[in-house]
Every structure is written in C-alpha cells, then in structure tokens.
Amino acid sequence: MSSKRGDRLFERLGDLLFDHRKVVLGLIFAVTAGFAWQIPSVKMLSDFAHLLPQDHPYIQLHNSIRDTFGGANIIIISVEVDEGTIFTNDTLDRIHRITQAVDEVTNINHNLVTSLTHRNIRKISQTAGGTIQSQTYYDPQKGGYTPAELEQMQSDVQSNPRVYGLLVSPDMKSALIKGTLNEGELRYRVVFDEIQAIREAEAVEGLTIYATGHPMLVGWIDSYSGQILQIFLYTIFIVLLVLVVYSRRLYGILLPLLGMILTSIWGVGFMGFFGYNLDPLMLVVPFLISARSMSHGIQKVERYYLELSHTHDRILAARNTFNSLFRPGSLAIVADAAALALIGLGSVPINDRMAVYASFWALSMVVTVLVVIPMMLALLPQPKQVEVKHTVLKSIFPKLAAVTGTPRRSRMVLWVCLGIAVVAAYFSSWVVVGEPEPGSPLLYSDHDYNLSSHAINESFPGSEELFIIARTDEKGGLKQPHIIKALRDFQVYMLLDETLGGAKGLPNLVMQVNQMTRNDDPRWAIIPGQPLDVGGLMYMYMMSAPIPGALLEFIDTDERLANMVFYYKDHTGETIRRAIHMAETWIEEVGSGIEGLHIDLAGGPVGVTAAIDQEAFQTNLIVVPAVLVLILVFTVWFYGSLHSGVMILMSMGFATLLAYACMGILGLGLNVNTVPMIAVGIGLGVDYAIYMMDRIREEMHIVDNLQEAVKRAVSTTGVAIAVTATTLIGGIIMWIFISELRFQADAARLLMIMLILNASAAMFLVPAWVDVFKPRFIMRSSRE
C-alpha cells in the first residue's frame, strides 16, 4: 500500500467511526460485558503435558512406556543421617514409614515405588536345595534387628549393584525413596502438600529429609501463587505513580487505566471462553501486555492535549489524535500480536496456547485503546487547562536529540552501534541451549528444591534418570544372548561418560542371578550362551518373588521391550547433549548392525528434558527470524517502502543481538521458557522504532528540513518512548524483587533489558540512520 493511499484509508476509517462513536462505544462495552462474564471460569494451574512437545519422538516414546516403565513425574526423597549410617533400627523404621506414606500419595503408581525397605526391592540368594529365593531387606514385623543382623544387611546391600549406590549411598549415610505418579489429571499441589507433610512428620534432629523431582517442582511453583496478588497491587501502585508524575491530568490518569482494564477483561475473558488456564510461569506476559495497553493510552491522551492546544475543539482534537496515531499504533499492535502468535510455531502446547490468547490479548488493544480512548475524549467535557506541561523529561530529550544533531555525529552513532554489535555477537555465543547449571532454573540456587537436588546428587550417582528402550523384532527376543550382550556393551560404553553415575538394565539382572546359581561365584557373573538358559534365569527370578510383575521394571510382558536406566548427576544442557550424542553414536556405529535389535531414544526425566531442549532450539531458529521477517513485511506494507522495513529490521536486530549477549552474560539458558520471552520482547520493543520513524516522517510535513525534523521527533516522541518504557518496566519490575520463582524474575529482567535496548535503538539508531541514509519515503513527505 502506498503511503498516500494509506493515509486516506485510515482517515476515512477514522471519520466513519467518529461519525457513529456512540454506537461504536456501545458495541465495545457490550462485548466487554460478555468477556467479563467468562472471567470466573479461568483457573491458574500448570499442566505437565502442556510443557512437552508432543510431536517429538522422545515424547512419543515417553508416552508409550510411561505406564510400563514409568514416566518423568518421579518423586525422589532422600533420608540422610548426620552421624553413623542408616543401618540403625530407628533410621530403617523411619525410612519404612516414609516409604509407606509415599505409597499412599495421591496418583502414585504402587508398582513403581522403590526404596531399601519396599517389597519391590529384594535380595536374591540361593537356598541349600539349589533354588533361587528373594527376600526383602527389611522386615517391619521383626520388631528390631541385632547389631550383627544390621551389619549383615549392610553387607547384603553392598553386594547388590541394583541397591548399592542407587538406593543407598556409597557412604551408607543416605537412602532414597522413589515414587512415580500415574500421568493424566495430576493434582500436583495435593501431592506436594502430602510430601511436605511427610517431611514435617518425620523430621528429627540429626537427620535431614530432602525431596526433589518434577511433581515437587510444580508444587513449589504453585505454592507461590499467593504472591501474584501482592505483585499485582504493587504493579498498580507503580503504574499509577508513573501516570501521576508524568501526566498530572485527570484524563491522563483515568483513560489509560480504562484502556488497561478493558484490555485485561478482553484478554482474560477470551481465555475463559476457550477454556485456557493461566500458567504461573507465563504470567509475566499478560502483565506486560496490560502495561503496554496503558502506555498506548498515555500516548493518545498526550497527543489529544497537543492537538487541543492548536484546535481548541475537543471533537476535532480527538479526531486528529485518532487519525495521526491509528496507523503507527495499529502497526505496533499488529507487530506485537504477530510476534506472540508466531510463538505457536513450535510443538510445545503451553506455547501454542499462549500464542492464541496472548496474541488476541494484544490485538484487542486496537479496539480497547486506539478506538475507545479518542472516542471517550470526544464525548467527555473539554478540559480547561490544555497547554503542554513542561516536565523534567521534556527538558532532557531536546539535549539528547543533539547526539544525532549533525551528519557527522549520526555517522559516529552508527559506527559505535556496529562496534557494540560485534562485541554482542561474541557474548551471544555464551548462550547455552537447555539449563546452564544443575537444579532447576525456575527456582533460586538456595531454594529448598535445588538444595535437595544438590544433596542427592552429591550422595548418589545421580537422581536424573535417562530411559533408553531396547526393542526386538520378535516376541521373546530379549532372551537371545547376543542381544543381552549387546545391551551390556552399550551400558559399558555409556559409563565412559564421567557425569553418568550408574546404570540398571536386564544384563545386570541376568548376570546377578547367574552368579547366584553358581554359589555366588563372581566368575559366573556372565551372560549364558543359550536362550533357554537366559529364559530360565529370568523365570527363576520372577518365580522367587512373592509379588507379581517382578520383571516389569526391566522388560515388558512380551519380552520385546527392555528399559535401560542411566543415572546422571544433573540435567544441564551440556550433560544431556553429551548423553544423547553418545547413545546416537553407539546406535549408528554398533547397534544398527545387530540383527533383530533396535534402540529407541529417550524417556525418563532426562529424555523428556532433552526433547524440550531440542524443541526450544528449533523453535528459536524458527520463531525469532519469523517475527523479524513478519514485522518487516508489515512495515513495508503499511508505509509502502522497502527502506522503512529494512530500517525497522535493523533496529530490532541490533536490540535482539544485544539481548542474546545479555543472556550469555547473565547465564540464562535457551529453553522452552525463555524463547517466548525473546519473541515477546521483540514484538513489544519494535513499537518504539515505529513511532520514532513515523514521527520523523510527520515532522517533515511541517519543517521541510531533515535535521530539524529529527531533532523535533527525538524531543517529542523520545519523551513518549521513555514514558512507555517506564510504564512497561513498571508493569513487570516487581516480579524481580518479590517473586520466589527465579524464572519469573529472570523473564522480567530479560524483558526489561530488551525494552531498554529497543528504546535506546529507537532514540539513537533510527534517527542516525535516517539522517545518514535519508530514506525517500521520509524525504518526500516534505513535498506532500
């Protein structure tokens, strides 16, 4: 669309709306009432399934095996004594009580509860008659063990590689209790409260109880939902303070507030109508969008007073305000909404949902702010004081305009920005895909959850489990000796990774039972050469267990699927990439040549995290360039100039590159949570460059001198940009100081950085670019 035709189109639209403003406002308020009716149905909760990229092969494997071998919703509790070992009657009885309590937790899978004292964990031995028997390590009915019996129990644990180091720490001071939840409609907060009650009930001096795992993480997140009201109240206070300090007019306070309220009602009501939930991790985005609506409102009211000082007619001033700001405002809002919508290009459901409701939330500002506020100004009584008030900001920005006051200074600004971009490119290389450090980045390092993770990983080979599935072509294929030997070779190869603390699988079981049948001679810890012998050993173990399904932690009932579990110290991005790379290398070089055997990656907490990290990386490669290109297209279409799009793209690219550099310096990883924040920051930050470019173009109608037009634009629109950025920062800054969730604070910090960088690019880079390259679509404005 050409610039002239666009101006006429928007002017005709403004005339049409203003001629029927009462009807238009009536319709808008009626729709608002309908959305308000839907608000009570919106819930605040996290759904684990919505965090998973369901199209990823790792997640598809996870979904197929979670009912047989367990999923990623694993609770891990550690009981650690300060002095001595856990092999005392009091400590063992406490471990047993905790195990029984975990077995009664809501949604627990009873067959997948494991601990030293649980019935599923057994010691295997050979009787005098030559048969295999299995017994529990701890009998709660015994009534106490003698010192000699406790010493023998410790010895039995040390001789069992499935227990020693995996369920009991090598120093004998800690024991693990693990439980896996049945997935579906999980009530994480209920589970969290039950585990916390267990920890509190069993707490005693000289003993520490740690708890970690995904259900605990989600429970901790949910437990801080009460902080949201506190943050909301502080945010309202800060935003009101900005309005009062900057505007000092009744309309300048009430109308931006009205725009924010209407926008929030439309956004939340839309969520209620379509059944979306508010996820605590993504609350920063709605807060930011609402603050953005207020900043648009401030610009409308300020422009109204400027027009009113010239026309002295409230209706004409309101109409002029609409006509002059509707085009750049619409472009900015459409850019915001487009950036939010493109978040859904990945396959993570939580981002897909946020893309829908957040983009609508942003797009609604076209109606709730750009249309409503000028129309309300046309209907409200004309204010008596209309002169432009001179604030501190309005005296500062004419001086800042001198930075690009001459062509020489403008060229210097561009060279400085180029140098900064080169340095930023280096620091951007520091950004890590996945989690940059052990524990959860959603919480602070000194949080109970991360302290528990650290303590467990220090005492045990690792609490982070990677499931790798061995699959055979035929039923009963896992009895084939060459397949079991291949799995053993695979385990040995994976154990070359120094971050891998241990492994568990079918080869370990077969070798252990085979050794037991040979008078526990360690020389017989080998895999038999005949399928019948392997099947016999598996049968002996299964029949010796007094509980059904003893083999299900290793293989399925058809003996076609075997679960190999690898225990890692952490789930940082580096650890996960190395683990997956090693597995893929062995599969390609060795596994692919073994007849009848297939190795499928990857399940368990590490496999799920690997899928999320890979999806986050791919989403980042798609979404961020897509946002930049789409905004380029919109800008070119709105202004009818390729140069306008290139200039906006340059400004966004500069600010985005600096944002990645800040992520690298601050240690923020690229994950499923931070990628949407980058897209949001780009979409909201581009507004500044658009408003600055449009104001320079508009000033050229008046002064017919590019240098003067740039100075006037920076002096006026620079103030609006500063107030807008301050309003947006005020809308999210309290997340940094109040929220117990590190991710919310980091997300707010990242968005603040992006807003400041985009505002700086708009106030210095865009004017310098215009001054040096003199775009034709701006220069011809002086002749129109």
Image (spheres, rainbow, N blue to C red):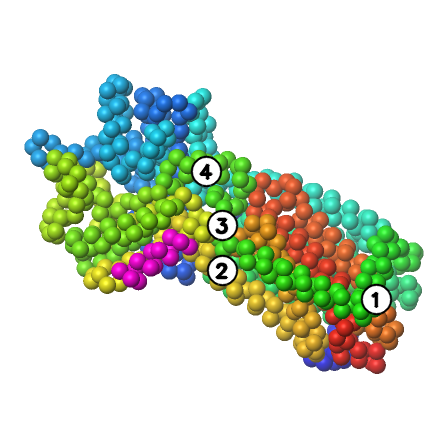
Q: Which mark is residue 760?
A: none
For the C terminus, which image quadrant?
A: bottom right
Give the residue at mark 2. 617
Give the residue at mark 4. 454
Badge 2 element: helix
Q: Position of residue 176 (x, y in %)?
A: 36, 34
Task: Tell me the distance, in whole angstroms, between the alpha carbons under discs 1 and 3.
Answer: 45 Å
Task: Tell which circle, 1 or 3, labels the residue nearer the N-terminal end.
Answer: 1
Task: Tell which circle, 3 or 4, labels the residue nearer the N-terminal end.
Answer: 3
Give the mark toward the camera: 1 or 3: 1
Task: Tell me the distance, in whole angstroms, between the alpha carbons under discs 1 and 2.
Answer: 42 Å
Question: Who's the residue at 15% across and 35% down the image?
Answer: 520
- Dividing the picture into quadrants, the one containing residue 34 is bottom right
Image-based side of 98 in relation to 370, left or right: left
Task: Tell which circle, 2 or 4, labels the residue nearer the N-terminal end.
Answer: 4
Q: Which mark is residue 435?
A: 3
